[in-house]
Image (spheres, rainbow, N blue to C red):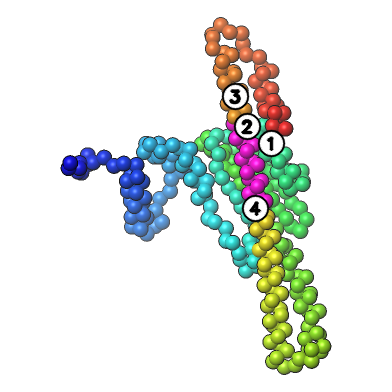
């Protein structure tokens, strides 16, 4: 059977994805000014017209919202970590209270809570210049949640003790071992290099452990947001079922105003 040609040819889902991907690559390679930008809402609209669920677009945007952090740097590991993701809808007061409570348990500090415009933030400043914050910023029925941690003195905590050890060992190389000249200097330089590699490894391990712990916090915060979405949907369904008639009695204000506190109690 002869396939349709030209504008009337029908492409399956796999072919559509391949064509759009290749067209994007060709357009990107043909532009010298860096191309153009689209908001997440615009991307979701385009995806919806192509038959793609906007929720999957938001999930993909969350995965690619920031460049991957380097596994190591000069000191052996990133001295700060940033984790971001997107959720559908806005974070209400009940969900935010649950997120703050969980964050306080994780950092073992009450921190400082503030909000402005469409953003909420929990901030922490601890010993050794440790800084951390959790923010939730809502826009276009989407919320970007960010966890940030920074400990600039982490490298010093591992390198300084080993530096002191290298200075203490200096007399051992040149007096106790009776090494002189180039031989003693070379052996001592090798010893210092070994200590530096050990410090780098320790820094990398501590930074990696912190990243894993932050990912665990992210998972717990995601659970809180999902649980609140389910409870909110349940409350909304209850309200709708109770007001199906125009002649029903007016809704009790205490039920509506107590929805947030109920969800908070159910979560705890």
Residue at the (69%, 36%) spot, across then down? 98
Residue furthest top in the image: 247
Indicate whether 163 appears above or below 24: below
Q: CA distance from mark 4 to mark 1?
A: 21 Å
In the image, 181 versus 116, the foreground residue is 181
> Marks 3 and 1: in contact by CB < 8 Å?
no
Answer with mark 4 or mark 2, whichever residue precedes in sequence: 4
* Residue that numbered label 1 is attached to: 98
Q: Which residues are magenta?
A: 212-229
Based on the displayed image, in which of its 4 quarters is residue 115 positioned? top right
Task: List x then y, in percent, for residue 263.
Answer: 67, 28
Q: Which residue is mark 4?
A: 212
Q: Which one is earlier in the sequence, the residue at label 4 or at label 3?
A: 4
The answer for how far apart the CA atoms under marks 3 and 2 are is 10 Å
Residue drawn at x 20%, y 41% as measured from the top left: 4
Q: Earlier in the sequence, mark 1 or mark 3?
A: 1
Q: Is tag 1's residue or tag 2's residue first in the polypeptide sequence?
A: 1
**Would you identify the image quadrant in which residue 11 lies?**
top left
Q: Are marks 1 and 2 in contact (CB under 8 Å)?
A: yes
């Amino acid at each position: 059977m002869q396939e349709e040609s030209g504008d009337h040819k029908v492409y399956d889902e796999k072919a559509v994805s391949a064509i759009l991907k290749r067209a994007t690559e060709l357009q990107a390679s043909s532009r010298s000014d860096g191309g153009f930008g689209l908001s997440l809402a615009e991307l979701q609209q385009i995806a919806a017209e192509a038959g793609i669920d906007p929720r999957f677009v938001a999930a993909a945007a969350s995965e690619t919202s920031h460049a991957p952090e380097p596994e190591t740097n000069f000191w052996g590991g990133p001295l700060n970590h940033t984790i971001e993701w997107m959720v559908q809808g806005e974070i209400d007061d009940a969900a935010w209270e649950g997120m703050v409570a969980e964050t306080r348990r994780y950092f073992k500090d009450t921190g400082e809570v503030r909000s402005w415009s469409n953003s909420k933030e929990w901030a922490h400043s601890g010993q050794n210049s440790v800084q951390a914050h959790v923010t939730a910023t809502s826009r276009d029925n989407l919320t970007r949640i960010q966890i940030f941690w920074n400990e600039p003195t982490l490298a010093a905590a591992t390198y300084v003790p080993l530096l002191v050890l290298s200075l203490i060992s200096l007399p051992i190389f040149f007096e106790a071992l009776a090494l002189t000249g180039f031989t003693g200097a070379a052996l001592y330089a090798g010893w210092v290099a070994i200590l530096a590699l050990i410090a780098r490894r320790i820094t990398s391990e501590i930074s990696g452990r912190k990243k894993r712990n932050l990912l665990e916090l992210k998972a717990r915060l995601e659970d809180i947001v999902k649980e609140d979405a389910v409870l909110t949907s349940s409350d909304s369904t209850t309200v709708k079922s109770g007001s199906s008639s125009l002649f029903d009695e007016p809704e009790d204000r205490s039920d509506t105003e107590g929805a947030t506190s109920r969800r908070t109690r159910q979560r705890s």
